[in-house]
Image (cartoon, helix red, strand yellow):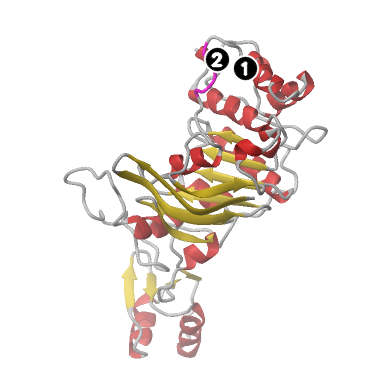
């Protein structure tokens, strides 16, 4: 578990993190979202003791990270994929880290296998692609078999197979009761991975909620219906005082619960081929939350280009589909701890 209370960090006159409090619970994946410069990386660095808070406290499993006798067995972190010395091999890098905690060579071999690095374990890190560097960073985070993982952009540079592997790994570890805290700018991937989301903007927490709650939002219920008699159904719905928008391909978007639309269609004897609630995507919800918190904005950038900007919560923008809620934990992730099943695809770009 990670607990922060009034956590703040200033760099001169710049307030990077502004007195935030939150708890990252075990047994779930908690996503950490925010625009560039929002304070995500600084917060993660304070959690593992790389930056000292200006005020406030943050603990990992009840203590400051550095106060643990063997910190790597409490929390593993990936904050910078290129943290390894470029002249060392992957195996030598991990062995060096392992020796600081009395971790044996067998565990090094296990994490190399888990992350798909066995075939390149004796190659120098300077020849690794970004994706392979990410895998090495994840291997280092797993080295102490910790109860808590802190990962900053763990899928950056990975191919689609690698992204799926990371997702399954994190879901599996969370199902074991571990604490998983990760940041990402890939909203679609976060929507499939996270159970809970923290959103930060200009150093302040903007949202701290289960992902299903964030997607549901406080807005009106909206339904989307497809029928070959779209014009007739639209007239019926409008006669009931409902707001209806005509969309292409015989589709109607109605500001009403799906049950009300279904009852109106049934009463009018109109067959409806598709009927579903419209939910905001995580990207829509995130953009709505952070619209006024973006520190770095391109000059001349459109406020919300048609079809791409944030919609009102509970009202998805065209072209955005969203999951019902958090992704289920995989029953057989094939990415287990030592002694369990193994699987890790190799990156398409292994070395130069």
Decide: is 23 above or below 147. Answer: below
Are the residues flagged by discs 1 and 2 in contact, CB closer than 8 Å? yes
Which one is nearer the viewer's eye here, 303 or 95?
Answer: 95
Horizontal and vertical percent for residue 6?
Answer: 47, 55
Residue 233 located within the stretch drawn in magenta:
no
- Sequence-first tag of 1 and 2: 1
The label on residue 93 is 1
Residue bearing the label numbered 2: 125
Task: Judge whether residue 318 can be spotted in this image.
Answer: no
In this view, the residue farthest toward the left is 300
Decide: is 15 above or below 242. Answer: above
**Stretch of the chain drawn in magenta:** 82-86
Horizontal and vertical percent for residue 57?
Answer: 53, 49
Horizontal and vertical percent for residue 210?
Answer: 55, 61
Task: Answer left or right for 116 relative to 258.
Answer: right
Q: Quadrant of residue 163?
A: top right
Q: Residue at x 49, y 23 (%)?
A: 82
Horizontal and vertical percent for residue 204?
Answer: 40, 55
Q: Residue at x 55, y 15 (%)?
A: 125
How far is the residue under mark 1 from the one under mark 2?
A: 9 Å
């Amino acid at each position: 578990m990670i607990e922060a209370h009034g956590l703040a960090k200033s760099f001169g006159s710049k307030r990077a993190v502004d007195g935030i409090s939150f708890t990252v619970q075990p047994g779930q994946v908690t996503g950490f979202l925010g625009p560039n410069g929002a304070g995500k990386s600084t917060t993660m660095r304070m959690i593992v003791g790389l930056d000292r808070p200006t005020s406030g406290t943050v603990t990992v499993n009840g203590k400051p990270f550095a106060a643990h006798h063997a910190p790597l067995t409490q929390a593993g972190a990936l904050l910078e994929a290129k943290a390894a010395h470029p002249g060392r091999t992957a195996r030598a890098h991990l062995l060096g880290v392992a020796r600081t905690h009395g971790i044996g060579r067998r565990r090094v071999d296990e994490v190399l296998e888990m992350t798909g690095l066995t075939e390149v374990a004796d190659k120098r890190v300077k020849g690794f692609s970004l994706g392979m560097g990410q895998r090495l960073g994840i291997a280092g985070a797993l080295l102490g078999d910790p109860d808590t993982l802190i990962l900053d952009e763990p899928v950056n540079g990975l191919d689609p197979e690698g992204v799926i592997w990371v997702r399954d790994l994190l879901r599996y570890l969370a199902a074991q009761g571990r604490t998983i805290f990760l940041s990402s700018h890939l909203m679609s991937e976060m929507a499939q991975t996270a159970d809970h989301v923290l959103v930060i903007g200009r150093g302040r927490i903007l949202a701290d909620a289960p992902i299903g709650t964030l997607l549901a939002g406080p807005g009106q219920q909206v339904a989307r219906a497809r029928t070959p008699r779209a014009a007739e159904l639209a007239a019926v719905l409008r006669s009931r005082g409902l707001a209806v928008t005509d969309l292409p391909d015989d589709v109607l978007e109605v500001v009403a619960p799906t049950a009300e639309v279904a009852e109106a269609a049934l009463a009018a004897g109109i067959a409806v081929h598709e009927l579903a609630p419209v939910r905001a995507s995580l990207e829509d919800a995130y953009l709505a939350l952070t619209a006024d918190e973006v520190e770095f904005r391109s000059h001349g950038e459109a406020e919300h280009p048609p079809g791409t900007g944030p919609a009102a919560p509970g009202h998805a923008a065209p072209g955005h589909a969203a999951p019902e809620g958090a992704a289920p934990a995989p029953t057989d992730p094939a990415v287990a701890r030592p002694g369990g099943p193994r699987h890790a695809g190799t990156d398409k770009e292994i070395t130069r």
